[in-house]
Amino acid sequence: MSAASWQVGPCDALQGSVRVPGDKSVSHRVMLLGAIGSAPLEAEGFLRSEDCLATRRAVEMLGAVVADLPGGVVRVTPPERLASPAAALDFGNSGTGIRLMMGLLAGRQVAAVLSGDESLRRRPMERVARPLRDMGAQIETSGGFPPVTLSPGGRLAALDFAMPVASAQVKSAVLLAGLSAAGRTVVRQPAVTRDHTERMLAALGCRVERGDWGAAVHGPCRPCGGRVVVPGDFSSAAFFIVAGLLAAGDAPLELAGVGLNPTRTGLLDILRLMGGRIELLDEREACGEPVADLRVWRSELKGIDVPPELVPLAIDEFPVLFVAAALAEGVTRVRGAEELRVKESDRIGVMARALQATNVRVTEHPDGLDVRGGRLGSGTVDSAGDHRVAMAFAVGAARAEGPIRINDVANVATSYPGFAADAARLGLPIEAVPPGRAA
Ligand code: S3P
C-alpha cells in the first residue's frame, strides 16, 4: 500500500506474528561488496526497498550484473574493474547508499557524479569527503552536500582516522576506501557504531580488526564471493516491538528472524529499562550476524532518562521511541542525540511538531527531546517524508485517543514496502487516504 497519507487506529488489541523484511544496512553492503569482489556474491533475504534498489541500480551502472534468482536470492557478479557510469548515480533518499559509495569509488579511477532526492541533497557529505581526500581521493561536494563528484586520481594511501562523529556510514566509507589502499586503514570511533561492514568484510576473506575502539582493514583486498543471509531488519522490527508493548492482546506479538547485532539493539535495552517485556527465542547466527525470534508482551511503560551510551546503538529508533514515551507514564528525556537532526528529516524538530499536533507535551533541545507521557491524542501529523516518522505514528495510533492521519507516507517504501499490509494483518486499522482527500 503506497499512498500520500494514512488514517490509522485506534484498536483494542493487536495479535499474530510478522517476519520483517531484510536488513537495509546489510542489503546495501551486499551490493557494494558484491560489485568489487573476485567472484559472484549471492544473498538470501536481500531487501527490495527503494533505498537498496537505488544502490543496486548504481552498481549496475558501474558494470556489475545483478540477477534475481528463485527464492528471493540475488546474485551480484562483479566486473573485472568498475567503469565510469554514463549518467549520474541517483541514491534517492539513501544516506547510506551515497556515503558508502563515495568510499567504495574513492580509489578506483572512476569518474562519477552521486546525487539523490531533495532530502538527501540537504545532508552533510564533507564528513565523508574530508577523510577520503586525506587518503588522496579526488572528490568534491556541492557546498558540503550532494551532488558529489569523483574524478580519477592517484593511488590512495592508508589512513589512521579519528572520527569526530559516531557514524557507521563515515566509518564504513573510509574502510571501503581502505580496500584499495596499501596498508592498514584505521578508523577510531568516539562511541560504538554499527559494525556490519567489518563483519561482512571478514566473512568475505578480508583482514579486518574490530572492537569498541573502531575498526581497521588491511588493503589492498578484494572480497571473495560466496553466499550470505540477510537477517530481518531490527529497525523495521522496532515498530512492531513498540506496537506489541503498547497494544498486544493477552498473547504476545511474535516477530520471526530479527537481526540482533549488538551494535543495533539499543532500543531493546531502553524499552526494557522502561518496563517492556520482550523475550528472545531460538537465538542463532546467520553469516556472522546474531538472529532470534521475539515475543513482545503488552507492558506498562515508564518514562526514563535514556542512557547516552545507548544513543548511537538506537540511532534509527528514536521516532518510535518518542511515540512509546508519549504513551508511557512520566517523562522520558533524550540527550546527546544531535545526529538525529541530519537524518532523513530533522528527527528532533519533526517529531516535536508531530507530537505537539497529537497533544503530547514536549520540550525540544538542540541534542534531544523531553516527552511528557500519558496520552497520544487524535490529530494530523506531517511525517516530512521521513519513513520512520510515518511508521512510528502508525503503531502509536493503536493506542491513541482517536484516529491519527499521517501525511507524506510514500517514503515508507524506502525501507519497508510491506509495512501497511503487515500492520493490517496484526489488526491495526490502517487505511490509505488518496492524495487530495481532506483530513
Ligand atoms: C547506517 C548507519 C547509521 C544509520 C543509517 C544506516 C549504515 O547512520 O542511521 O540508517 O548502514 O551504516 P550513522 O552514520 O549515523 O551511524
Image: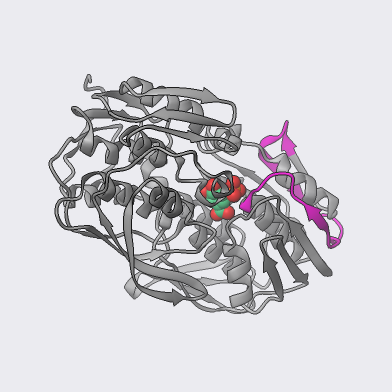
Is residue 156 on the magenta stretch? yes
Name the residue: 21% across, 22% down: 437
Name the residue: 44% across, 68% down: 230
Q: Tell me the magenta residue range.
A: 141-168
**Residue in the foreground of this view, choosing between 393 and 128:** 393
How far from the left and from the top, in percent, is residue 248?
20, 50
Q: In which quarter of the image is residue 297?
A: bottom left
- On-image quarter of the N terminus: top left
**Residue in the foreground of this view, choosing between 179 and 196:** 196
**Residue in the foreground of this view, choosing between 436 and 219:** 219
Name the residue: 84% across, 70% down: 183
Name the residue: 44% across, 48% down: 270
How far from the left and from the top, in percent, is residue 2?
29, 41
Label total for image: 0
Question: Is 164 placed left or right of 417 in the picture?
Answer: right
In this rendering, does residue 96 appear at all?
Answer: no
**Residue in the foreground of this view, choosing between 29 and 113:** 29
How far from the left and from the top, in percent, is residue 60?
55, 60
How far from the left and from the top, in percent, is residue 113?
67, 45
